[in-house]
Amino acid sequence: MAKFVGQQVTMIYMAKDGSLTKRQVKIERINEASVTGYCYLRKQLRTFRMDRILAIQPQRNMWRMSS
């Protein structure tokens, strides 16, 4: 998991109510119980419990628009 720090990933996450979401997250830090990163769905820094992350995959093609 530590290899994802600083990267944007796609994550399948299960909320405490059992609902599933697919999220784009830029990983900021990881510890043994949680992952913290910028969630593009919620547009803010969020903390995700490790035991609720069902799948994680690095983003292969990150596009940036120049201004």
Image (tube, rainbow, N blue to C red):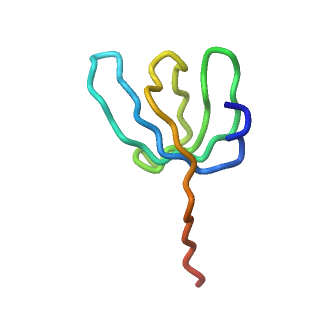
Where is residue 49 drawn, in percent x and y? 52, 20
Left-right relation of 64 to 52: right
Where is residue 17 drawn, in percent x and y? 27, 17
> Which image quadrant is residue 1 in?
top right
Of 26 and 44, nearer the camera is 26
Q: Residue at x 53, y 34 (%)?
A: 46
Q: Is residue 66 above or below residue 34?
A: below
Q: Residue at x 50, y 15 (%)?
A: 51
Q: Residue at x 55, y 65 (%)?
A: 61
Left-right relation of 19 to 1: left
- Tally the numbered discs: 0
Q: Is residue 40 above or below residue 36?
A: below
**The C terminus sits in image quarter:** bottom right
Of 38 and 59, nearer the camera is 59
The single residue placed furthest to the bottom in the displayed view is: 67
Q: Residue at x 43, y 26 (%)?
A: 54
Q: Is residue 33 above or below residue 3?
A: above
Left-right relation of 4 to 9: right
Where is residue 2 drawn, in percent x and y? 73, 32
Where is residue 32 drawn, in percent x and y? 68, 16
Of 20 and 16, nearer the camera is 20
